[in-house]
Image (spheres, helix red, strand yellow):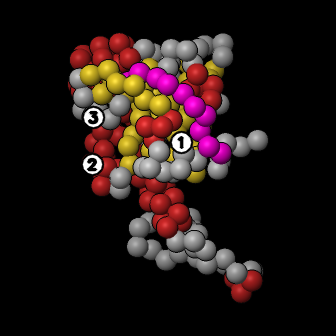
Amino acid sequence: MSLINTTIKPFKATAYHDGKFVDVTEASLKGKWSVFVFYPADFTFVCPTELEDLANNYAEFKKLGVEIYGVSTDTHFAHKAWHDTSEAIKKVQYPLIGDPTTTLARNFEVLIEEEGLALRGTFVINPEGQIKVLEIHDNGIGRDASELLRKVKAAQYVASHPGEVCPAKWTEGAETLKPSLDLVGKI
């Protein structure tokens, strides 16, 4: 069974954000678009490159009303230490959620049980708390924030334009499709 179009499960976690420890719950996400980016662990190799890429594109996500949440099974204390010591992570302005109980990793079905770490999972969540985009892949493969931004824009477009869909490689302002009997066999 897929998590697409399911509502996220209740949770309570602590994040490191703007020099403080803050609580984050499913209620924190309601009313805005959110992106959860799970990664295996702080102080690793591919993870800081991804989080820095997101940080470099964070302003674009904010313009769309989207909050990003980085999530790993580390503690919020480890997130602070990483933020204080890594030039890449110092750029991160979005919340870094600690999930040492692995509740979130389990809820989003990205937990590697035998390691206690998360797979690289990306989830776009609409303002109602439903998962609209998900991507999970091997931990050796880094993600691209610009492609995630494109997917967020497509999800927002489809949400605000009922009856329209975005074709492959759709970008903002490009033509969309209106599924109908007239299109069958013509694409």
In the image, what residue occupies the spot 55% across and 35% down? 121
Distance, label 2 to label 3, CA atoms, is: 10 Å
Q: Is residue 77 left or right of residue 104?
A: left
Neighbor class of circle 2 (other Cα within 10 Å; few <14, some 14-19, many 20+) is few
> Residue 135, located in which quarter of the rendered image?
top right
Q: Are marks 3 and 1 in contact (CB under 8 Å)?
A: no
Q: Position of residue 125 (x, y in %)?
A: 52, 46
In the image, what residue occupies the spot 75% across and 83% down? 181
Q: Amino acid at mark 3?
A: Gln
Q: Magenta stretch containing residue 186, yes or no?
A: no
Q: Nearer the viewer, residue 77 or 57?
A: 77
Question: In terms of secondary structure, where does tag 2 sit?
Answer: helix
For the stretch drawn in magenta, the main secondary structure is loop
Q: Amino acid at mark 1?
A: Phe
Q: Magenta stretch containing residue 11, yes or no?
A: yes
The residue tagged 3 is 93
The residue tagged 1 is 123
Q: Which residues are magenta?
A: 6-15
Question: In terms of secondary structure, where does tag 1 sit?
Answer: strand
The residue tagged 2 is 59
> Residue 95, located in which quarter of the rendered image?
top left
